[in-house]
Amino acid sequence: MITSAVISQLRRETNDIPKLTRMARTGDSSINIFNTGRFPIVESSYTVYKGTSAQTETTNFTLDLDSGDLQYTAAPSSTVQAIFQGKYANWRDKNWVDAINNGIDDLA
């Protein structure tokens, strides 16, 4: 895909290389929102678990890519860890696409 190649090149040239982050917090049966600690989160770069069970986005959790807030539909119990692993960068891919499109529009 041409856009992803352009984004990769722009990330290299601006030193906006996505970095891996991991968050693990033990639940308490009542808190269902956890912050990943690093954001913005790069699209499609993350996995979420509740204990050892992989979670499905929209069914088991939502993730705000801009704020890093991970919200489970059901809070993890006191013996289960909320786990997030993904990549963060200065700009999400969406921001790069918007910048590229704005640049193209300015040329017209």
Image (cartoon, rainbow, N blue to C red):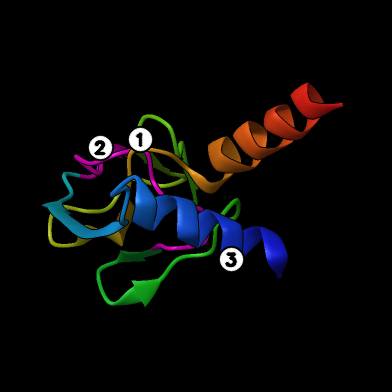
Residue 97 spot, x, y in % from top left: 64, 42
Query: Would you identify the image quadrant in which residue 95 lies?
Result: top right
Residues shaded magenta: 29-46
* Residue tagged 3: 5
Tag nearer the camera, 2 or 3: 3
Residue 48 spot, x, y in % from top left: 37, 62
Q: Amino acid at mark 3?
A: Ala
Name the residue: 54% across, 54% down.
Answer: 7
Is residue 4 or residue 24 the one in the foreground? Answer: 4
Q: Amino acid at mark 1?
A: Asp
Name the residue: 36% across, 75% down.
Answer: 53
* Residue tagged 2: 35
Is residue 55 or residue 5 the one in the foreground? Answer: 5
* Residue tagged 1: 69
Q: Does residue 81 sit above or below 93 in this rendering?
A: below
Label 2 crowd (10 A; few <14 / some 14-19 / many >=20): some
Q: How many marks?
A: 3
> Which mark, residue 91?
none
Label 3 crowd (10 A; few <14 / some 14-19 / many >=20): few
Name the residue: 79% across, 28% down.
Answer: 107
Residue 66 spot, x, y in % from top left: 43, 32
